[in-house]
Image (cartoon, helix red, strand yellow):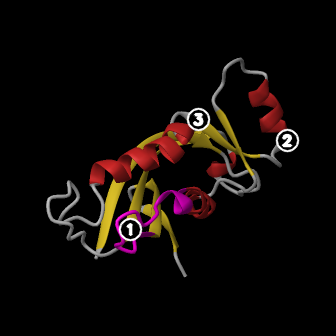
């Protein structure tokens, strides 16, 4: 069985070597979908009976490990030195330095890397993260999926 929880956040970024508008500082209303697989929990009387995982728990984990960190932050490639140096001059600015250019593809892969260890089988139902889908816009997204 698979379940999916969707969350949204706002963040800025830029693609430093892009040949079009995306090379400029700008932002998006991102959406992220977290898809988990596992067996339906059959433990009679357990609060999670009949579920793969409680959707509120999926949200709480993704919120604390990723969404709260990235929401209203500027996601910047650490190698984009001019922008990194500029952002460091802004007192209290929420900046997340990444080891990759913050494209939708790289952000989806990074989100998968961050979230994968957080979703573990705690009920013997073989729970695991299957896919992270990151929407940069309603019409553009990237999937990072378990191979």
Looking at the image, the residue that sits furthest to the top is: 91
Q: Would residue 132 appear left or right of 94 to someone viewing this image?
A: left
Query: Is mark 1 in CB contact (under 8 Å) with mark 2?
Result: no
Q: In the image, is residue 115 above or below residue 37?
A: above
Crowd class of label 1 (few under 14; some 14 to 19; many from 20; radius 10 Å): many
Instruction: Find the distance from the CA under tag 2 to the CA under tag 3.
Output: 17 Å
Query: Is mark 3 in CB contact (under 8 Å) with mark 1?
Result: no
Q: Answer whether residue 133 is magenta in the image.
A: no
Give the x, y percent position of residue 38. 34, 74
Q: Please give the label number shown on residue 36.
A: 1
Helix, strand or loop at disc 1?
Answer: strand
Instruction: Find the distance from the CA under tag 1 to the CA under tag 2.
Output: 37 Å
Give the x, y percent position of residue 14. 66, 46
The mark closer to the camera, 2 or 3, is: 3
Q: Nearer the viewer, residue 72 or 20?
A: 72
Residue located at (30% from left, 60% from top): 53
List the residue tagged with mark 2.
81
Q: Answer whether residue 119 is magenta in the image.
A: yes
Q: Quadrant of the C terminus?
A: bottom right
Q: Which residues are magenta?
A: 115-128
Looking at the image, the residue that sits furthest to the left is: 45
Q: Would residue 86 appear left or right of 103 to someone viewing this image?
A: right
Magenta span: predominant SS is loop
The tag earlier along the polypeptide, 1 or 2, is 1
Q: Nearer the viewer, residue 103 or 68?
A: 68
List the residue tagged with mark 3.
73
């Amino acid at each position: 069985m698979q379940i999916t929880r969707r969350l949204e956040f706002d963040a800025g970024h830029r693609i430093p070597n892009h040949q079009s508008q995306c090379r400029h500082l700008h932002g998006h209303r991102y959406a992220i979908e977290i898809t988990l697989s596992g067996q339906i929990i059959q433990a009679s009387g357990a609060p999670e009976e009949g579920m793969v995982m409680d959707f509120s728990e999926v949200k709480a984990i993704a919120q604390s490990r990723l969404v709260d960190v990235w929401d209203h932050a500027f996601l910047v490639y650490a190698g984009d030195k001019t922008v990194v140096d500029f952002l460091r001059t802004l007192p209290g600015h929420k900046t997340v330095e990444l080891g990759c250019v913050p494209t939708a593809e790289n952000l989806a892969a990074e989100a998968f890397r961050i979230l994968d260890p957080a979703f573990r089988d705690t009920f013997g139902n073989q729970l695991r993260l299957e896919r992270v889908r990151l929407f940069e816009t309603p019409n553009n997204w990237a999937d990072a999926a378990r191979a």
